[in-house]
Each structure stands twice: as C-alpha cells, then as structure tokens.
C-alpha cells in the first residue's frame, strides 16, 4: 500500500505539473499577443485602491493615461503590494494598451506582464521533474528487485536503522555498508522507507543485499521482507 501511494504521489505531481505547464504556456501566449499588439503610453497614478485578503491588505494603483485618439482612460493595476506607500499619487509609469480596446490596459513592467506565466512555468517544471523522478525511482526499484536476484551478486551484511524526518512525519530506513574488495571503497546501501522503527528486528541479523557488481552504489536491492507489516 505504501509503495502504491508513492507511485500515486508521483503521478499526481506529474498531472499537476503538466496542467500548470499548459496554463503557463497559455497565459504566456496571451501576454505575448497583448505585448506585440499593444501601444506604449505614459500613465499617471491618480489614486490608490485597497483590497483585503485574509490578514493582509493589498494596494493597487489606479492609473490614468491618454490614448492616441486623445481620450483619457483609467484602469487598476493587476499587481498590488502590501505596502501602502509603495505607490504615490502623481507618479508616472509606462503602460500598454490595445488601440482598438484602450480600456484593456496594463502596466508595462515585468511583474504585471510576465510574473504569472513565469511563476506557473517555474512551478510546473519543478513539480514535473519531482513527479517524473518519483515515478522513475518507483519502477526502477521494482526492476532491481526482479533482476538483481537473477543477475546480481548476493551480500549478507549487518545493518542498522536510521530515522528520516520530513514535516510532521518520521519514517525509517535500514542501512548497511560494504567494503568493495575490488577498489577498497565503501558503498552504503539503503532500503525503502518504512513507517516504524525496525531496530528490534535487526539485532544480530545479517540481511540479504543484492548488488550489481559493476555499479553497486546505484543498483542494489536490500531484502527487508522479513520485517513485519505494520497493522
């Protein structure tokens, strides 16, 4: 059950990452189309609008500008800050607007134009990479469990338990070390994570570890099937 949950986590991260990637590309295209079709003009901050979200108040400048047809338009900037004095009435800043639809205007800045798609793309890449690595690691471990008992070398090693904490959860792994006689280098082997402390079951016990003699550090499988299942 634990192993399936790991796979589901990886698949879920891949799905979310892919969805965010699609959204980021979509928003980037919208912003790029607006940027290439819009006209630049000088705007003036005429007022500061505030909005509240949970415990924070955000301030958005209300901006006025004159289009090429001589008409004056106003709009509220999408990007706000939590600092009431980050904007001042009368300040000048560059804006962009569509000639056919001057009411569709935006502050000509990185934060206003590109921050949303950039953040979405960055998060999507991270989630997709973590999800892909999780899925790869899951299937690779299955492959090693199947192949190494047939093609690898069997070691029987003394082991120890070690806790691994993340957020509010503590898990354990079984560790062992092996001195490779071929190059006199020590390789450390790690089991899958388990939800309880296995120390009482490891005393005076040798554990089977299957390795690929060519690359034991990356290709190994520790057999901890002797441990009881947690109820």
Image (cartoon, rainbow, N blue to C red):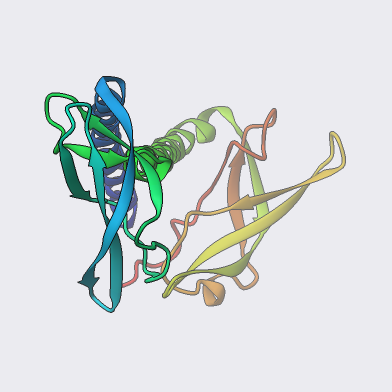
Q: Is residue 13 visible?
A: yes
Report whether 126 appears left or right of 31: right
Residue 203 percent coordinates (x, y): 62, 73
Q: Nearer the viewer, residue 194 or 86?
A: 86
Q: Nearer the viewer, residue 189 or 226?
A: 189
| Quarter containing the N terminus | bottom left
Q: Is residue 131 visible?
A: no
Q: Quadrant of residue 47?
A: bottom left
User: Can you say whether 156 is above or below 199 in the image?
Assistant: above
Report whether 210 appears left or right of 105: right
Residue 201 percent coordinates (x, y): 53, 72
Residue 217 percent coordinates (x, y): 67, 40
Report whether 166 appears left or right of 51: right
| Quarter containing the C terminus | bottom left
At x 84%, y 34%, the residue is 182
Count the marks: 0
Residue 145 percent coordinates (x, y): 46, 39
At x 17%, y 27%, the residue is 69
User: Can you say whether 22 is above or below 6 in the image?
Assistant: above
């Amino acid at each position: 059950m634990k192993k399936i949950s790991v796979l589901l986590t990886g698949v879920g991260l891949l799905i979310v990452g892919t969805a965010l990637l699609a959204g980021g590309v979509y928003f980037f295209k919208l912003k790029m189309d607006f940027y290439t079709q819009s006209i630049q003009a000088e705007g003036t901050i005429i007022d500061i609008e505030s909005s509240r979200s949970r415990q924070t108040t955000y301030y958005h400048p209300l901006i006025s500008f004159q289009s090429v047809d001589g008409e004056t338009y106003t709009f509220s900037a999408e990007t706000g800050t939590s600092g009431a004095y980050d904007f001042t009435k009368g300040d000048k800043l560059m804006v962009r607007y569509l000639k056919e639809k001057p009411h569709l205007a935006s502050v000509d800045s990185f934060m206003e134009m590109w921050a949303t798609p950039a953040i979405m793309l960055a998060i999507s890449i991270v989630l997709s990479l973590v999800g892909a690595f999780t899925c790869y690691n899951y299937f690779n471990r299955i492959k090693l469990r199947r192949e190494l008992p047939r093609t690898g070398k069997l070691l029987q090693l003394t082991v120890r338990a070690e806790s691994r904490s993340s957020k509010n959860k503590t898990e354990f792994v079984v560790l062992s070390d092996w001195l490779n006689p071929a190059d006199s280098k020590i390789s450390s082997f790690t089991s899958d994570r388990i939800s309880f402390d296995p120390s009482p079951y490891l005393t005076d016990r040798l554990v089977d570890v299957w390795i690929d003699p060519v690359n034991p550090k990356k290709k190994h499988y520790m057999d901890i099937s002797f441990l009881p299942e947690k109820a």
